[in-house]
Amino acid sequence: MKRLGILALALFMQHISAQSNRFVYQVTMKPDAENKSDIKTENAYLDISAEKSLFYSENRYKRDSILQKAFQSGGGRGSISRDQMEGVRTNINYSVEKDKASQKTLFKDRIGRDLYSYEEDRPLNWKMSSETTKIGDYKVQKATTDFAGRKWTAWFTTDLPYQDGPYKFGGLPGLIVKVEDDKGDYSFDLMKNYKIPEIATLNQFGNTLKVKRADYLKQQEKFKADPMSFMQNSGGGGGGFPAAPRSNRGGGNQNPADMRKRMEERVKEEAKKNSNPIELQ
């Protein structure tokens, strides 16, 4: 009986250690350079396991789940109401995965129909400070870095056994509880954390193209310049979200010229709303 008890305890401890942790951050953003009073706030998850971590938007996860269910049921995107999609709008369309063994950081973002993935090639060079304070329940220490055209201040804690943080931030001797840039345009604040069985699996609609960071930036500019041509030339036109069924309401098939004009207007409007990105360089 004693031996069985020890075995059960060992199995229980193995199960606990195999679990992952989810850290919920409140992300505050001012993405419009011409309208800094337009402040966007949403939650993002940092899921951490023994092998890796994954940072992504809570709304992105909810949106992907809605789309997946619609496609699996055969209804396609046309079966999803505008209200459903409005409720899961996000300014965080990217995800960031950090591999603990290789120390590599992978950034993934959608351009048009396809998902572009690149390995971050700029190291984070932190300057440690002796300054400490308390944020919530955690004793935290200050560190600063220059990254992607912004000066960042992070507060990390050694109260938790992780050396990680939101977005591409990490590499400090503890978990980042708060990190913000000196202009107050972007901040990530830890709100809560809890155990999860495993790290989430994000739906990867379309092709995943592995590129260099410079190539990703070039593709972004091409898409902004001529979104319709970009969509027609990328992935053979078959990647990304399955197309919604065409509707005959309102006079049959849509005029390609009108579609091009509407898409260009939408992309330009999105670019204007995101004229103050998190990475300036």
Image (tube, grey):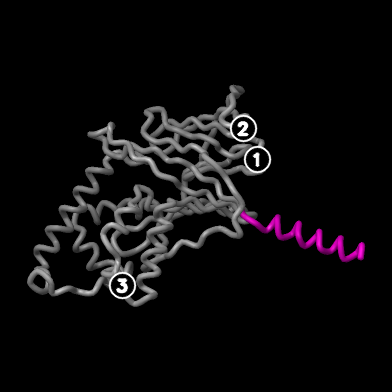
Residue at screen point 39% across, 36% down: 186
Q: Alpha-carbon neighbours of circle 1 within 10 Å: few (<14), some, or many (≥20)?
A: few
The residue range painted magenta reads 1-20
Q: Quadrant of residue 237?
A: bottom left
Helix, strand or loop for disc 3: loop
Residue at screen point 76% across, 57% down: 13
Q: Earlier in the sequence, mark 3 or mark 2?
A: 3
| Residue 141 shown left or right of residue 78 in the figure | right
- In the image, what residue type sits under mark 1? Leu
Return the residue at label 3. Answer: 76
- In the image, what residue type sits under mark 3? Gly
Return the residue at label 1. Answer: 160
Helix, strand or loop for disc 2: strand
| Residue 200 shown left or right of residue 61 in the figure | right
Q: Residue 23 appears at what percent x and percent y?
A: 55, 46
The front one of 61 and 157 is 61
Q: Alpha-carbon neighbours of circle 2 within 10 Å: few (<14), some, or many (≥20)?
A: some
Q: Is residue 3 magenta?
A: yes
Return the residue at label 2. Answer: 138
